[in-house]
Image (cartoon, rainbow, N blue to C red):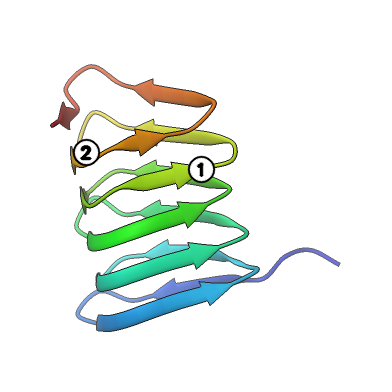
Amino acid sequence: MAKASTTITAGTLVRGRLSGAEDIDLFGRVEGQIEIEGALKIDENARADAEVTASDVYVYGVLIGNATASGTIHLTETALAVGDLTAPRIIIDAGARVR
């Protein structure tokens, strides 16, 4: 059975701790902590002010906080990331803003 994906839609604000085994597609905003066994995708218009632990993290929007991945952290050309990034593989595309 394929893993399910959770979608946090645009206009939605989640405050607190998110945890689970599935992937999360973030189109809204999260403030707090994200601990998932799956992948986290932060859309171009989304924002995560969070400490993140996931298998993979794909940032197209804004990530403010530390991120730890067991696989890959990928910052695309539209990404803004402020915090420590820890992963075996980190990809930073030209144009991504990192601090």
Relative to 28, 85 lies left or right: right
Crowd band around label 1 with a 10 angstrom C-alpha radius: few (<14), some (14–19), many (20+): many
Residue ID at (19%, 80%): 11
Q: Quadrant of residue 59?
A: top left
In the rendered image, which residue does mark 1 sit on? 69
x then y, percent, for residue 18? 44, 76
x then y, percent, for residue 29? 23, 71
Residue ID at (20%, 36%): 78
Crowd band around label 2 with a 10 angstrom C-alpha radius: few (<14), some (14–19), many (20+): many
Residue farthest toward the right in the current orientation of the protein = 1
Note whether 5 is above or below 90 in the view shown: below
User: Is 39 or 28 nearer to us in this picture?
Assistant: 39
Where does the N terminus fall, quadrant-wise? bottom right
Which secondary structure lies at badge 1?
strand
Q: Quadrant of residue 90?
A: top left
x then y, percent, for residue 91? 40, 23
- Label 1 vs 2, first from the N-terminus: 1
Where does the C terminus fall, quadrant-wise? top left
Note whether 74 is above or below 50 in the view shown: above
Residue ID at (62%, 60%): 37
Spatial CA distance of label 1 from label 2 is 17 Å
x then y, percent, for residue 74? 40, 33
User: Is 58 or 69 nearer to us in this picture?
Assistant: 69
> Is there a contact, CB below 8 Å, between mark 1 and mark 2?
no
Which secondary structure lies at badge 2?
loop
Give, as a three-letter code, the residue at label 2: Ala
Q: Quadrant of residue 50?
A: bottom left
Of tags 1 and 2, the one toward the viewer is 1
Give, as a three-letter code, the residue at label 1: Ala
Marker disc for residue 79: 2
Relative to 63, 8 lies left or right: right
